[in-house]
Amino acid sequence: MAKVIAISNQKGGVGKTTTAVNLCSCLGILEKKVLLIDLDPQANATSSLGIENEMIKNGIYQLFEKSCSITDCIIENKIINVDIIPSHIDLVGIEIESIDLIDREYILMNAIKNIKKKYDYIIIDCPPSLGLLTINALTASNSVIIPIQCEYFALEGLGKLLNTIKSIQKIHNKKLSIEGLVLTMYDSRLNLSNQVIKEVKSHFDEMVFKTIIHRNVKLGEAPSYGESILEYDVNSTGANNYLNLARELILNN
């Protein structure tokens, strides 16, 4: 039975999609069967894996529209053991389109019930907001990974996200837990990066993953080639970091 993990932070540019894509590819290499659900209308996770709009017949938008089944939305990926449900810019209007639906917070949860046995992990890349799509992701998930960049204002908005998680636990999903906080874009040369790590650990301590994702040029380049970091440069610091994160996640579960 799959463990469902949402990767969420309403603050943009924290390495959320980078973490989703590369964590999935590393779990796949470590012989875990993984489904990546791209729930962000920007569809960056989809394009990061080399999937063009023309290749998408059905995706997450059609699933929310209830015009196709979840199995019709899944695309097999070139990365071993990794499938994806792609996103599309049309998803941006789903909040208004589904305003009259009674069970609109549970669309994703109900959809993935039938495929959980097929996978070890289902990873959801959330949009940088706390709207309907993120609520769907958190309602459908067992846990949430929160990426935090090692930069100024790193903890900005984190309180809001934690309050949203508490609300979801009360109303929609009592079993939702925090898998951990991932520190991203770490630069050992900067005092600021070290201060942020110290601050995050002082507040959250055991909730923080031991693996830290370093700032790495290769991580930034890989998506433009439609590749994960393992495909683009398996020997890079970024590849090593995400392999360690995947191992740590497996060990914790």
Image (cartoon, rainbow, N blue to C red):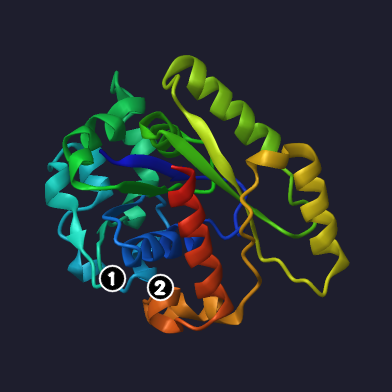
Q: Quadrant of residue 151?
A: bottom right
Foreground pick, 110 / 180: 180
Query: For numbered disc 1, what is the local secondary structure?
Result: loop
Residue 2 higher or lower than 98, as above or below: below
Q: Position of residue 7 (x, y in %)?
A: 48, 47
Evaluate if marks 1 and 2 touch, with contact meaning CB atoms under 8 Å apart: yes
Residue 157 visible? The answer is no
107 displayed left or right of 13: left
Residue 207 higher or lower than 248, as above or below: above
Of marks 1 and 2, which one's residue comes earlier in the chain? 1
Foreground pick, 4 / 128: 4
Give the residue at mark 2: 228
Q: Quadrant of residue 210?
A: bottom right
Q: Position of residue 215 (x, y in %)?
A: 66, 72
Q: Position of residue 241 (x, y in %)?
A: 56, 68
Report the disc number at residue 79: 1
